Amino acid sequence: MPSFFLAFMAVALTLGCGREGVRMARLAQASGGSRAVLLAGIVPACCAAAGFALWLGQSLAPLLAGGAARLFAALALALAAADLAVLRAGPPPREPTRSLGALALVLLAALVSGAAGFVLLALTLALPAPLLAAAGGGCGAIVALGVAALAGRDWEARLPLAALRIGAVLALAAAAGALALFG
């Protein structure tokens, strides 16, 4: 169970202070009353992203001998830290889509290619229970993005996102360094 909870917390923090959480809150604000569509799109996208991270981690694990898996996981954590440090959410959408499929596909692409995807990939490689890590990461993504969608404009107004982002960048960089040096 530690794999589940560690992945849950790491992915939720990464998404909550990163651009995906801000983007989801802005999309909820721009969509007015159709937050149910957003919530319905979040669950399949998060589950698919967790499944993809598990599949990729399990596919790479046999190819990476010994310490190579740890170094690859450390590199993934370093990329996640760089993503959080550099990339910011774009402007609010002018005309948000009401399409559940389009929302799920765009969210899936953002989850797989963003900081949370790198964190989840690293955790499925580095933790002893990759299935529990993927499940925890998927649940953490659903919770973080769901709360952001429900919060709407309050997400950016009431949360200290800059301080959380700096803390997450430092934690990810420290974890990457510790995994590369001592893992």
Image (spheres, rainbow, N blue to C red):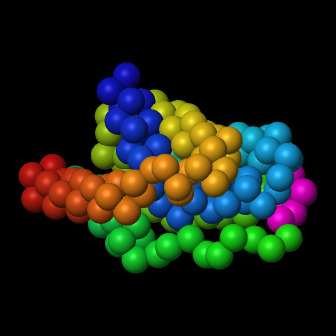
Placement of 122 over or under 89, stated as above or below: above
Q: Is residue 98 magenta?
A: yes
Please identify the quarter of the rendering in which residue 64 is found.
bottom left
Give the magenta range: 96-102
List x then y, in percent, for residue 178. Answer: 14, 54
Closer to us: 33 or 139? 33
Quadrant occupied by the N terminus: top left
User: In the image, what residue occupies the spot 32% across and 39% down?
Assistant: 127
Does any portion of residue 119 appear in the rendered image?
no
Using the rendered view, name the quadrant where residue 37 is placed: top right
Looking at the image, which is closer to me, 105 or 171? Answer: 171
Q: Which residue is found at the position 68% from the left and 41% from the top?
A: 150
Judge left or right: residue 83 versus residue 41.
Answer: left
Q: Count the marks: how many? A: 0
Residue 8 is covered by the magenta coloring: no
Q: Position of residue 75 (x, y in %)?
A: 30, 66
Residue 86 vertical placement versus 160 (above, below): below
